[in-house]
Amino acid sequence: MKLSELKPVHTARIEAVGGEGALRQHFLDMGVIPGAEVTTIKFAPMGDPMELQIHGYELTLRIADAEKITITPLEQKQTSDSDRRDRKNTEHPGLGEEGRFHLKGDGDPLPEGTKLTFALVGNQNSGKTTLFNQLTGSNQHVGNFPGVTVDRKDGVIRGHSDTLITDLPGIYSMSPYSSEEQVSRNFVLNEKPKGIINIVDATNIERNLYLTMQLLEMDVPMVVALNMMDELRGNGGTVDVNTMEAMLGVPVVPISAAKNEGVDELVQHAVHIARYQERPLEQDFCGAEDHGGAVHRALHAVAHLIEDHAARTGLPLRFAAGKLIEGDALIAAQLDLDQNEQEMLDHIVLQMEKERGLDHSAAMADMRFDFIRKVCDACVVKPHESKEHLRSQKIDRILTGKMTAIPVFIAIMALVFYLTFFLIGPFFQDLLAGGIEALKQLVEQGMTAVNVNPTIQSLVLDGIFEGVGTVVSFLPIIVILFFFLSLLEDSGYIARVAFVMDKLLRRIGLSGRSIVPMLLGFGCTVPAVMSTRTLPSERDRRMTILLTPFMSCTAKLPIYGFFVSAFFPRQSWWMITGLYLLGILTGILAAFVFKNTLFRGEAVPFVMELPNYRFPSPRNVALLLWEKARDFLHRAFSVILVATIVVWFLKSFNFRFDLLEDSHESILAAVSGLLVPIMKPAGLGDWRIVTSLVSGFMAKESVVSVMETLFRDGVTSIGAVSAASMLVFSLLYTPCVAAVAAIRRELGRGWAVCVVLWQCGIAWIAALIVQLIAHFVGLT
Ligand code: GDP
Ligand code: MG
């Protein structure tokens, strides 16, 4: 029977996993291995993908992929309570107690002054970023979506100035499946950190240890941080840390990153193992008795075979042997075996497959999970069905329910936008604008009192206050939108959106995972583009990056606010909603074009973990908002201020540097005038509009500040039709410099230039269409 035929909620044992290559390896790495028990939970509202439970966590899988998995249905699910054992009161170090696992004691430390570099490695959503924030005191972006950390972040551990810790992307294994896994693997292999801090989610220990085992093979000093102990204990579970240390051969420190418990002790251990270079004592996890010892013998044989190659290339031996058996082409190329050796390897692997009755990848994954089972049996008292999990299931009944999921999604997004743009946002915006106006009058009075030169007065009042002031007054709206987006992300909801929307997104050639960059794009294109690195296929990644600029970012809000309040105050709700929808719609159209031209082929499989819902930590959210606000203000007082001053200067003088009354003869009018003929058909043939749009390339907010400087008698003179064209053009034209730079980093210069050009082209056409419509309905 196929897994896809198993109705929810039923349990089955996996018999065989079909498919091939990297995808299949990914299945295996996620624990979908022959012999594992799997329970179907539900289908997504549109019938695809499906949600499964395996090794105690939730996973999504498309029907097409589930068809490749053969199962035998089981009568009933083995309840986890039946194998609970009473080891509550064994003596072992708990949160923050002194662990005792050090063998070298104070043997030969690294020389004084050596920089102790650490890699922070762990599964997605295990709390890496939270721990990183605790360790470094810095404010990194934390989210409850698998894989929010997409860029490397470094920081010094507080109180240890000779350390440097790097927060790596969350990964499930050391196979190069997504570009994040490659980043993490290469970091450990090439940059050779002095130590690894492996963060393990104690509530999800079975799956998390899979990565741990591969890290141990890297032969780098390591300490395991057993995170989320608060949650585990709260549900009646516990871990015998001493036994686990003995079995894994590295220090294990129970911590709670969110509550800052046990973190100091973790640091002590980490510094110790790095300074004394205490390598893992255990790397040999294959048992001579397990299933006749086939895997054991194969691994050791291959290790002997390649010993010299591994030493020469500097690859850790056990790791290299394991990856060779798994068929990892990158490692094989690096080791550069000669033909005889390659043939011996093939024979060893063939023999192992024959004896074990599983293919090479499945046999390796099975060996690892076997060992994990032993560790868990010996050290872990499983918790009751956790409160958090039960709560998540209840919430999911509505948020991913068949009838409710999509209406709820629409309602939530509508609520977010309503609160941001019409309820809370404008209230604070008015307050702030009032404050700025009051300040402006004060400054004006002051300057008049001391007789400041009128040119300077005009610069300060018309240029800086009007321009930068208007932009700054949008700060509240922007912060509030980010607040809601981070709540959605941090709580775990966005992962559900990906699950629910996968089928729809496949119609336009993408997978559910692409929804994350898209939603982040409503905040800012830069992090959105960066977050595409979580996507495992290059094709999906490129396509998603090209589509994110269509999601209207917060920096465009001042433009909308400015024009809508000047021209369409009665229809503001419809205008702004319409603009957002127009952006999305254009994106969908573009996706269809891409799908049938540049990016033919299928979207990647959708294998993703669905984390429990968690209350976002107020500290994390507050830090994020502070970061965004600081960023915005920084831009307002750097790029936008400079742009405003430059524009003010160019419009106030002519080529002979005479101060002008009428800016129509200014330098600016002459230069911008060159572009006017091109923009005329689109209804934007006014040099002042052209200037503001050009300045918007630096930062979108400066469109407004420049407009304020150039239209002294009010912007209404351009007319409502031009204003509509302007809105549409601003929505669609080139992303700002920062976003283009991010795109260049991800896709290269050629693509970045293409994005700029083609977005401008689309915007121009859209503005032209606005003009034509206005013409035909008789408005012009
Ligand atoms: P990352 O994806 O590995 O970087 O994980 P994050 O740091 O983004 O954390 C994922 C989620 O787990 C967030 O909602 C955190 O608030 C939460 N979290 C992190 N550490 C702990 C912990 O020790 N206890 C509990 N209960 N929650 C935690
Ligand atoms: Mg993170």
Image (tube, grey):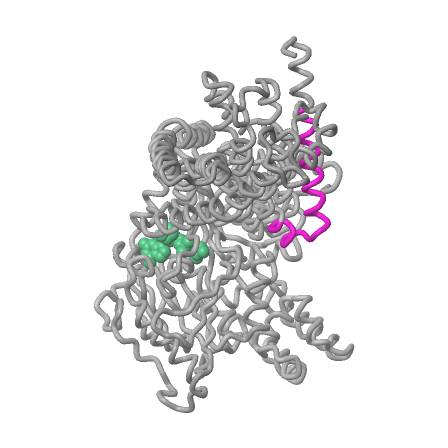
Report x, y in % for residue 568: 50, 18
Report x, y in % for residue 535: 58, 50
Of the pair 520 and 354, the residue shown nearer to us? 520
Chief secondary structure of the magenta span?
helix
Q: Does the magenta stretch include residue 243?
A: no
Report x, y in % for residue 617: 33, 50
- Which residue is found at the position 36% from the left and 35% from the top? 445
Q: Is residue 393 at least partly visible in the picture?
A: yes
For this view, does 249 lie left or right of residue 648?
A: left
In the image, residue 648 sits, relative to residue 357, either above or below, namely: above
Q: What stretch is highlighted in magenta?
A: 741-767
- Which residue is found at the position 37% from the left and 33% from the top? 437
Q: Residue furthest top?
A: 778
Q: Is residue 751 magenta?
A: yes
Q: Is residue 80 at least partly visible in the picture?
A: no
Q: In which quarter of the image is ligand 2?
A: bottom left
In the image, residue 70 sits, relative to residue 665, either above or below, namely: below
For this view, does 681 lie left or right of residue 620?
A: right
Q: How many marks?
A: 0
Q: Which residue lies furthest to the bottom in this view?
A: 107
Report x, y in % for residue 447: 39, 39
- Which residue is found at the position 29% from the left and 48% from the top? 387
For this view, does 366 lie left or right of residue 671?
A: left
Q: Residue furthest front?
A: 451
Of the pair 67 and 688, the residue shown nearer to us? 688
In the image, residue 63 sits, relative to residue 627, either above or below, namely: above
Residue 546 position by quadrant: top right
